[in-house]
């Protein structure tokens, strides 16, 4: 049975490391002094400050990414005890030892826990997950949204491109080009915007292309793993309906 951190003066970590994108991964154990309320990031910072492994041998500091430290930027996504999540909100007191930390496997590993999330950002580019403007001049206030519509749209806007939903999805891997649930949900968000809907058909066409919405296998892992509680499966269902309607309209020439 795994020990709880509260009973230890040190915390044991088993970190999956990788020297470069082409090198083989390996694991290295570390023990860091326990402090109440510490998170995984603070433990990694301790390793960085004093890069000694559990055998007391000098080693290279562990590389990872982080920024906001309050579950907003999505940069510190990694697999902690088998679950993809944010390291900043992973409290050591609530984790079983040894704490196993590894990079997300859906994305190419650059070094240690640093990954290349380019696949996700390219998916957002593919579906044009932004509102285009035709100049830098002041266009004035845009159209108002109904409050009921604004409320659910705000929930979709909480996406922080952390990549956890892609890591959890069995249909996102190196054998497929599925864009993943985050991009699909962003299409719903921007198509619902009074200005963004001007590019509605363009986004739906992107969802209907190779690697689009047909790649979803409805495992629903994404909605269970999303740290922001975004209704991803609801968005996927809505976009399934919209792309079907768009396809029939194209067939009928209307």
Image: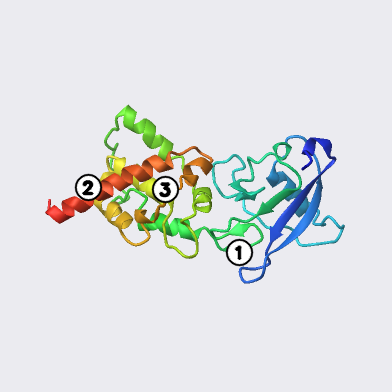
Q: Write down the residue under mark 2.
A: 245
Please provide percent x and percent y for residue 36: 77, 35
Mark 2, secondary structure of its residue: helix
- Residue 110: which disc? 1
Give the mark nearer the N terminus: 3 vs 2.
3
Residue depicted at 41% across the width and 52% down the height = 217
Res 122 quadrant in image: bottom left
Please provide percent x and percent y for residue 200: 26, 48
**Going by the picture, which residue comes out furthest to the left?**
253
Q: What is the CA distance from the residue labelled 1 to the residue labelled 2?
A: 41 Å
Residue depicted at 82% across the width and 57% down the height = 53
Please provide percent x and percent y for residue 193: 31, 40
Give the mark nearer the N terminus: 1 vs 3.
1
Q: What is the CA distance from the residue labelled 1 to the residue labelled 3?
A: 30 Å
Q: Write down the residue under mark 3.
A: 218
**Going by the picture, which residue comes out furthest to the right?**
56
In this orientation, which residue lies closer to the viewer: 246 or 64? Answer: 246
Vertically, is 125 above or below 68? Answer: below
**Going by the picture, which residue comes out furthest to the top?**
147
Circle 3 residues within 10 Å: few <14, some 14–19, many ≥20 = few
Residue depicted at 59% across the width and 43% down the height = 68
The number of callouts visible is 3
Res 58 quadrant in image: bottom right
Mark 3, secondary structure of its residue: loop
Circles 1, 3 touching at the beta carbon (< 8 Å) = no
């Amino acid at each position: 049975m795994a020990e709880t951190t509260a009973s230890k003066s040190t915390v044991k970590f088993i970190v999956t490391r990788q020297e470069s994108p082409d090198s083989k991964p390996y694991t290295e154990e570390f023990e860091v002094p326990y402090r109440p309320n510490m998170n995984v990031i603070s433990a990694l910072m301790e390793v960085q400050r004093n890069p000694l492994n559990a055998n007391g041998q000098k080693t290279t500091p562990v590389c990872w990414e982080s920024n906001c430290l309050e579950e907003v930027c999505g940069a510190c996504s990694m697999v902690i005890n088998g679950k993809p999540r944010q390291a900043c909100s992973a409290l050591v007191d609530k984790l079983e030892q040894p704490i196993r930390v590894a990079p997300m496997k859906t994305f190419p590993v650059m070094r240690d826990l640093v990954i290349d999330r380019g696949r996700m950002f390219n998916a957002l580019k593919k579906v044009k997950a932004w509102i285009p403007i035709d100049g830098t001049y002041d266009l004035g206030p845009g159209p108002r949204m109904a409050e009921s519509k604004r409320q659910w749209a705000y929930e979709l806007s909480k996406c922080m491109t952390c990549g956890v939903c892609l890591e959890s999805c069995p249909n996102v891997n190196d054998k497929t080009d599925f864009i993943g649930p985050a991009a699909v949900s962003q299409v719903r968000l921007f198509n619902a915007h009074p200005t963004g809907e001007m590019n509605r058909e363009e986004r739906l066409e992107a969802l209907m292309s190779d690697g689009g919405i047909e790649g979803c296998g409805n495992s629903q892992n994404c909605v269970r793993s999303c740290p922001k509680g975004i209704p991803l499966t609801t968005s996927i269902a809505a976009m399934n309906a919209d792309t079907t309607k768009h396809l029939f309209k194209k067939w009928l020439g209307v």
